[in-house]
Image (spheres, helix red, strand yellow):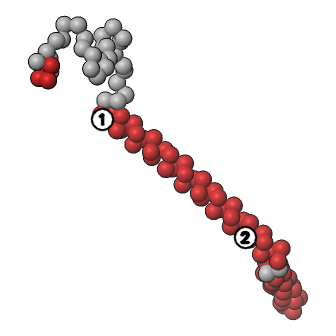
Amino acid sequence: MRRLFWLAMGITIGALVVRKLSRAAEKLTPAGIGASIAEGLRDLADAIGDFGADVRAAASAREEELRAGTGLDAPLPERDQAQLQLPGRQLPGRRGAHAADR
């Protein structure tokens, strides 16, 4: 019985070793090397995509902080409340407001 156990153990270990060596040999073939390079490039592309998404999210959050801090996110005034003054033109009732106009 003892010999049968060791025979089964040897066959099992031998089969596992053969499978490991076959996988290692397959990885060293041109097809295996190409597959591992393709997998590495896919992983690299995924990492670059994740990095780009993180950068866009951080930039968006920082832009919101800057807009809130500078007031750029405030609503625009109504057209009746604020009129644009073009250079060289004065609005009625504002004559002589600038030192150069005197």
Give the residue furthest to the bottom. 3
The quadrant of the image that shows the C terminus is top left
The quadrant of the image that shows the N terminus is bottom right
Look at the image and tell me whether residue 3 can be seen. yes
Residue beneath the point at 72% across and 70% down: 37
Q: Amino acid at mark 2?
A: Ile
- In three-dimensional space, the C-alpha distance between marks 2 and 1, rounded to whole angstroms, equals 47 Å
| Foreground of the two, 43 or 88 | 88
Q: Quadrant of residue 27?
A: bottom right
Q: Quadrant of residue 69?
A: top left
Dot 2 or dot 1: first in sequence order is 2
Residue 102 lies left or right of residue 20; in this view the side is left
Q: Quadrant of residue 99?
A: top left
Residue 94 spot, x, y in % from top left? 18, 11
Q: Amino acid at mark 1?
A: Gly
In the rendered image, the vertical position of residue 72 relative to residue 98, given as above or below: below
Crowding around mark 2 (Cα neighbors within 10 Å: few <14, some 14 to 19, many 20+) is few
Residue 25's label in the rendered image is none
Residue, disc 2: 37
Residue 61 spot, x, y in % from top left? 42, 41
Residue beneath the point at 78% across and 72% down: 34
| Foreground of the two, 42 or 89 | 89
Residue 69's label in the rendered image is 1
Number of numbered markers: 2
Residue 21 spot, x, y in % from top left? 81, 84
Residue beneath the point at 74% across and 71% down: 36
